[in-house]
Amino acid sequence: MTVTTPQPRITVPAQTPQPRPRIRDAAEDTGWLELTEAVREAGQYTTRAEAERITRIVLSALGGHVTGDERVALAQALPREAGRVIASQIPATHPLTAREFVDSVATRIEGATPATARWDVSSVLSVLATRIGEPLTTRVLSELPPGYALLFGRAELAATA
């Protein structure tokens, strides 16, 4: 006869797979940092965090109003994070005038007035125009109602009859 002695059970917990940390592309970070730093300087914001917050708000508002090929080209011309902000927006059902656009941005920024929102919008969009270049800026403006050129730091020239 064989005698067995009971052994205590040892439960080994199953290893849960750890999510792999996302390795950020250094160029991606650098491009976004350069963009928000340029906005910080243009808008004379005291911190990069404030400039980043304003940049995200303005780009998300713009993303709903630029559509089609221009939206794709704009998203591709910007740092990846800025392109994501633009591309993730649902297209607007009707275009806003430049004044309505500024007013809509004012509602997204706590304590903003139409004047401060215009400053914020112009700070971001003038940097954007410099970054994406003249040809793409012209294409983007062609998709927007009249009045946006000043927000992009360009003169609004009326067509002659």
Image (cartoon, grey):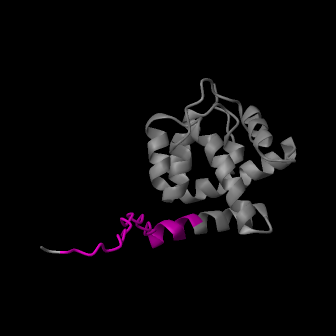
Q: Quadrant of residue 63?
A: top right
Relative side of 43 to 1, left or right: right
Q: Position of residue 110 (x, y in %)?
A: 83, 47
* Closest to the observer, 117 or 20: 20
Relative side of 161 to 115, left or right: left
Direction left: furthest residue: 1
* Closest to the observer, 104 or 10: 10
Q: Position of residue 88 (x, y in %)?
A: 52, 42
Q: Position of residue 78 (x, y in %)?
A: 51, 56
The answer to whether residue 154 is visible is no
Relative side of 129 to 119, left or right: left
* Closest to the observer, 161 or 155: 155
Q: Quadrant of residue 53?
A: bottom right
Residue 116 vertical position relative to residue 107 in the rendered view, above or below:
below
Name the residue at 67% across, 33% down: 158
Query: Magenta stretch?
Result: 3-32
Q: Position of residue 16 (x, y in %)?
A: 39, 63
Total number of numbered labels?
0
Q: Quadrant of the N terminus?
A: bottom left
Q: Quadrant of residue 42?
A: bottom right
